[in-house]
Image: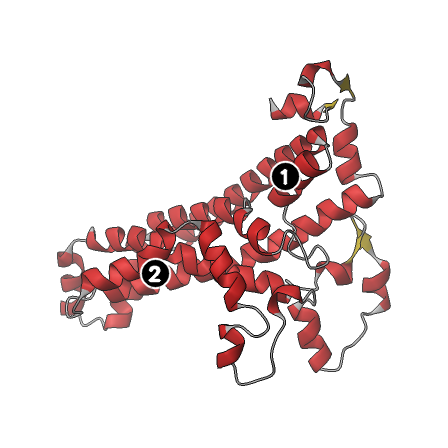
Amino acid sequence: MSILVSLRDWTGITAPFNSQFVGLDNYRELLTEDGIRRKDFAISIRNNLYYVLGVVPTQTFVALVLAVIVNQKRLKAKGFFRTAYYFPSITGSIAISLIFLFLFQTHGAVNAILPFQDINWLANANGVIHNFLGVLGLESPPDWMDDTEVMSLSLWEWVSGPSIAMVSIMILTTWTTIGTFMLIFLAALQNIPPSVEEAAELDGASAWQRFRYVTIPLMKPTITFVVTLGLLGTWQVFDQIFAISFGGPEKTTMTPAFLTYFQTFQNGKASLGASMAVLLFFIIMAFTGLQRLMMRNKELLS
């Protein structure tokens, strides 16, 4: 249905197939025609790409570390820690987003415990990579990066990094998702036969060697599963963006999922929103396929 609607000029109010058929015009407007539509779509892709690169590795690594910790035999109050780590995952995303909205205010709790000056987290559109380069003395981009454009954005804009506001949302998302992934990793750890690690220990392997050469290889299917879920979730992020920033400041937290909503329900461009949804589907499929290919190649190499 979305594919069919994306080929028409539909406002979302009338019956979809009473609208005019326009073919691939919506896709051309997003991908090839220079204008605000293509630039906004490119900005959303850039923002979401940094979001994926920041959230997926972090939440996977932290969840695995927590799973290993709560799986220790000598750890007391295991039930408490498992519940505490998992609890944010079952709390409403909008409720947690509103709490973080207060925590990251200029005079909020986060800035109160930081040793340096107050950061305007949720209204700061500066890219963190640009900020870092500015500290090193690189205030302006090289001419070739400023003059070269890809989908109406200069290369300098593509490599600006996530904004400070987006980093705040990335912290929120990581905190709310690690509990679920921790339980998945914990189940995988508990399914490893104790005899395997005992055999490695008898062979003289240290704790790190047993983890590196025994536990991790046995958990590769679970790691692949967790990373796949992470990719699916991060490319569809919407709730936190809607509740915290509504795509701002200066469109630096706008994502394809949010832009799809905005074009469909705010601008009355339902067919354009459907086109974005279809393109987002192919982006997710491409990244998921690439991730699975990389994991398969690692297994072949090992």
Furthest residue in direction bottom, as rendered: 115
- The CA span between labels 1 and 2 is 34 Å
Percent x, y of residue 198: 14, 63
Viewer can see residue 293: no
The residue shown at (38%, 57%) is 178
Residue beneath disc 1: 261
Of mark 1 and mark 2, the one earlier in the sequence is 2
Please state the total of marks drawn on the protein image.
2
Furthest residue in direction top, as rendered: 18
Can you say whether 89 is above or below 17 in the image?
A: below
Q: What element carries label 1?
A: helix
The residue shown at (64%, 25%) is 3
Three-letter amino acid code of the residue under disc 1: Tyr
Percent x, y of residue 7: 72, 23
Depth check, front residue: 149 or 219: 149
Q: Dot 2, crowdedness within 10 Å: few (<14), some or many (≥20)?
A: many
Three-letter amino acid code of the residue under disc 2: Leu
Percent x, y of residue 6: 69, 26
Q: What element carries label 2?
A: helix
Disc number placed over residue 64 in the picture, else none:
2
Image-based side of 108 in relation to 229, left or right? right
The residue shown at (86%, 60%) is 147
Can you say whether 292 is above or below 281 in the image?
A: below
